[in-house]
Amino acid sequence: MTHSHIVSEHVVMMLSAETILARVSELGVEIAKAYAGRNLVLVVVLKGSFLFAADLCRAIELPNLRIDFFGVRSYGDGTESSGVVQITQDLAAPIAGDDVLIVEDIVDTGLTVLHMMDLLRTRGPRSIAVCSLLSKPTRARVAVNIDYLGFSIDDKFVVGYGLDVAEKYRNLPYIGIVERD
């Protein structure tokens, strides 16, 4: 009789839903102050940033706030980003003359964000800044200025609040670490 080894996994909470929402509210207030009287476009990086962006945009009290979506996929060996980015969904409207805030779920090596900034800069925005829910500073391979940062975390693989592993766990209201038994 053959026994197959079944690996089970569970998620251990790292950042609670309440902690995340409190920080997102603070970021919204900071962003609203910084961009008062200007045309701000939130460029939401799909898919992982969509939940963060939904809460963030509701926390930014600006009348001239627009939201657009940018899908990217970076190529690497599966666990390492190469920084080579393929656009899977482009912006729906021009950003020339607008202030652009890239909304990311996590800045890891920095290569993908840096490439996106370079690409978007060619489209003539007034300014480009970065807002990221999470950053893993120990993984950085290039210097990327994160203008609005939710949390710096250790080099752990995290899921929840939009972040996934093989499309699982995006729907968790908190951010956690996957542990395998």
Image: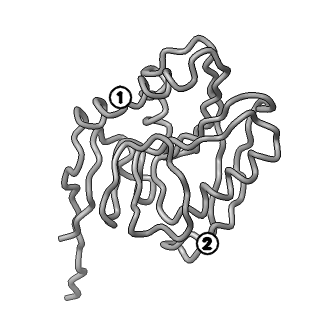
Q: Is residue 27 above or below residue 131?
A: above
The residue type indicated by label 1 comes to Glu
Q: Secondary structure at mark 1?
A: helix
Tell me which numbered mark, 2 or 1, is placed earlier along the sequence: 1
Q: State the image quarter where residue 170 is shown.
A: top left
Tell me, for residue 110, which label it has, or none: none
Q: Residue placed at 62% from the left, 27% from the top?
A: 67
**Residue 72: x %, y % from top left:** 65, 53
Q: Is residue 59 above or below residue 21?
A: above
The residue type indicated by label 2 comes to Ser
**Residue 166: x %, y % from top left:** 44, 59
Q: Is residue 178 above or below residue 70?
A: below
The residue carrying mark 1 is 26
Q: Nearer the viewer, residue 82 or 101?
A: 101
Q: Residue placed at 23% from the left, 55% from the top?
A: 11
Q: Residue placed at 68% from the left, 50% from the top?
A: 117
The way the protein has been coloured in the rendering is: one colour
Q: State the image quarter where residue 5 is shown.
A: bottom left
**Residue 71: x %, y % from top left:** 65, 47
The residue carrying mark 2 is 82
Quadrant where the image shows the C terminus: bottom left
